[in-house]
């Protein structure tokens, strides 16, 4: 190999270390689970085979992914709409904030899965329960952060709008909303992770469908290798949605770039 | 054209008197500076004129009509520029026109024209975070000018800039005020700036904020900074104002 620049050599070393560590980890997992009962653990090699089977031969995993994704997006979408509206209201109206703030703080702090039993009593074991739980899990961080962002908008920027005789609505959309965007996105990100916990939690504990449902069904049947396949899909789905959110955020926040 | 009649201001019912029966006028095409120590209420007075703050007593009249709300006749230039950071320079300048419902192509064309007037052509697509303080305030000026107001209200517009940029922008403003025939009410705490730019200086005092005295500025336009500053009348006027402000300070 010819001489490499030091930073290039450094990058190759970092990559080698990362891959090396992964190999060691997988090897340790493989060796420690080989001798174990298949009801308790599965080696990565068998998980890989199960992955192939479930994904490309039986294909069940895709339809279940769709079920989970659909519930997630419906619930999270509703949360964004409700959260932005209520958050804007709380941020702009002292009275609304005073009245609603205790409930928002309380519900934000409450782990949403604590509400699963009461939801089952009210809604029955019903697919919609997932959407309700996703909303309850994710709407409060969105409300809270939107309200904080809107409340802390620089009053001097609002004066710009007022000095040009902008209507309240125009000030809200052209000044308050964009100025609050950094905190709104923080709320959307926290809401996103809460929503994922909500949808998978509801699937594992109550409705037993979707990717979460697959995890608990395979676990109940002690099919450990199969069980890891939906887990891999859940992780992938979460990573993709989070990456999509980050992408969306950079489009909206181009102006924060400091230099050419 | 602008007439401020007996304006009082308290920020709360039993709060201290911030402005005490302020009376003054600005004629069409005139450049008037409000000069005073910080805390004398000159920015408060300007915001009352802009319609951003309500007066407790008295009124503001434009061409004889009471003007308590913001209106198209008035435009404001802010001390801290107050550009919308998520908008490019041209979109900041177009903001006032956008609020007024001017069609996109037309407002962008107008905005480009005013950016050019302030030597900012080539910076249309820069965000505020990408340009210097002096350039930001030139965008702020262009934004106010673009709506073609009859009265420009400027709140210490050069206060946050370094000395060199400040002098450069003073010249720029003097040039534009002359070429666009602007009527300007200009708040500053710099005596030199007030003298160099104004036709008339209104000096305010503290506690409560009130008008102490008015000075006409004797220099012909167009003015050249070095010539004005070298004139003995400049030093004399400067000294008069300075002594007045010092007396006001030690009087309390």
Image: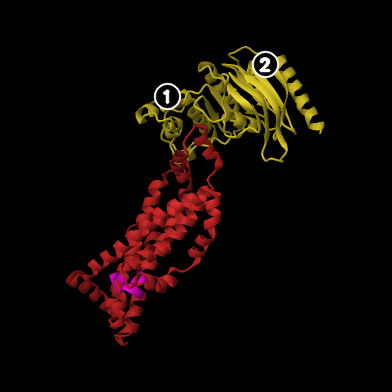
Chain colours: A red, B yellow
- Name of the residue lying farthest toward the front: A122
Residue B123 x/y as whole percent: 43, 32
Q: Is residue B183 above or below residue A75?
A: above
Residue beneath disc 2: B217
Q: Is residue A134 above or below residue B84?
A: below
Residue beneath the point at 33% across and 57% down? A2
Which quarter of the rendering shows the C terminus of chain A?
top left
Residue beneath the point at 76% across and 21% down? B240
Distance in Å between CA atoms under marks 2 and 1: 32 Å
Secondary structure of the magenta portion, mostly? helix
In the image, taking residue B164 as reference, residue B233 lies left or right, namely right
In the image, taking residue A66 as reference, residue A200 lies left or right, namely right
- Res A106 seen here: yes
In the image, taking residue A240 as reference, residue B170 lies left or right, namely right
Front one among B11 and A208: B11
Circle 1 residues within 10 Å: few <14, some 14–19, many ≥20: some
Residue beneath the point at 20% across and 74% down? A53
- Name of the residue lying farthest toward the left: A57
Front one among A148 and B154: A148
Which quarter of the rendering shows the N terminus of chain A?
bottom left
Residue B99 x/y as whole percent: 44, 33
Q: Secondary structure at mark 1?
A: helix
Residue beneath disc 1: B113
Region of the chain picked out in magenta, as a range: A200-212
User: Residue under mark 2: which chain is it in?
Assistant: B
Q: Residue B109 lies in what quarter of the image?
A: top left
Q: Secondary structure at mark 2?
A: loop
Front one among B137 and A120: A120
Q: Is residue A206 magenta?
A: yes
Front one among A71 and A196: A71
């Amino acid at each position: 190999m010819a001489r490499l620049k030091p930073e290039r050599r450094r990058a190759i070393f970092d990559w080698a270390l990362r891959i090396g560590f992964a190999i060691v980890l997988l090897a340790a997992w493989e060796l420690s689970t080989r001798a174990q009962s298949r009801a308790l653990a599965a080696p990565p090699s068998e998980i890989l085979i199960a992955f192939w089977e479930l994904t490309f031969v039986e294909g069940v995993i895709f339809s279940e992914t769709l079920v989970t994704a659909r519930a997630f997006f419906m619930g999270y979408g509703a949360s964004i709409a409700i959260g932005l509206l209520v958050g804007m209201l709380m941020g702009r109206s002292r009275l609304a904030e005073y009245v609603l703030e205790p409930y928002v703080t309380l519900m934000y702090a409450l782990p949403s899965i604590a509400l699963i039993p009461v939801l089952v009593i009210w809604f029955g074991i019903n697919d919609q329960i997932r959407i309700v739980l996703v909303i309850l899990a994710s709407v409060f961080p969105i409300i809270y952060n939107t309200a904080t962002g809107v409340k802390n908008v620089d009053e001097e920027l609002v004066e710009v709008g007022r000095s040009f005789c902008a209507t309240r609505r125009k000030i809200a959309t052209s000044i308050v909303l964009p100025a609050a965007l950094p905190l709104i996105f923080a709320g959307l990100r926290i809401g996103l992770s809460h929503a994922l916990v909500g949808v998978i939690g509801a699937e594992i504990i109550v409705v037993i469908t979707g990717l979460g449902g697959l995890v608990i069904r395979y676990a109940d049947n002690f099919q450990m290798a199969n069980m890891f396949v939906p887990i891999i899909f859940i992780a992938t789905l979460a990573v993709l949605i989070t990456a999509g959110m980050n992408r969306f955020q950079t489009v909206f926040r181009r102006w924060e770039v400091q230099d050419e | 054209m602008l007439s401020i009649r007996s304006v009082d201001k308290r920020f709360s019912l039993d709060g201290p008197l911030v402005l005490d029966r302020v009376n003054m006028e600005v004629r069409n095409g005139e450049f008037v500076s409000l000069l005073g120590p910080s805390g004398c209420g000159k920015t408060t007075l300007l915001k009352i004129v802009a319609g951003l703050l309500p007066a407790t007593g008295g009124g503001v009249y434009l061409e004889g009509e009471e003007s308590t709300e913001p209106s198209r006749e008035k435009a404001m230039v802010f001390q801290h520029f107050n550009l919308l950071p998520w908008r490019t320079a041209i979109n900041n300048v177009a903001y006032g026109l956008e609020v007024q419902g001017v069609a996109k192509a037309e407002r962008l064309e107008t905005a480009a024209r005013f950016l050019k007037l302030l030597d900012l052509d080539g910076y249309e697509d820069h965000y505020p975070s990408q340009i210097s303080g002096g350039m930001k305030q030139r965008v702020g000026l262009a934004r106010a000018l673009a709506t073609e107001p009859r009265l420009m209200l400027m709140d210490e517009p050069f206060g946050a800039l370094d000395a060199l940029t400040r002098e450069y922008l003073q010249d720029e403003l003097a040039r534009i005020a002359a070429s666009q025939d602007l009527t300007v009410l200009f708040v500053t705490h710099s005596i030199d700036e007030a003298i160099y730019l104004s036709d008339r200086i209104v000096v305010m005092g503290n506690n409560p904020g009130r008008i102490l005295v008015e000075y006409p500025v004797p220099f012909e336009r167009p003015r050249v900074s070095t010539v004005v500053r070298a004139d003995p009348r400049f030093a004399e006027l400067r000294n008069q104002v300075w002594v007045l402000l010092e007396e006001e300070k030690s009087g309390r």
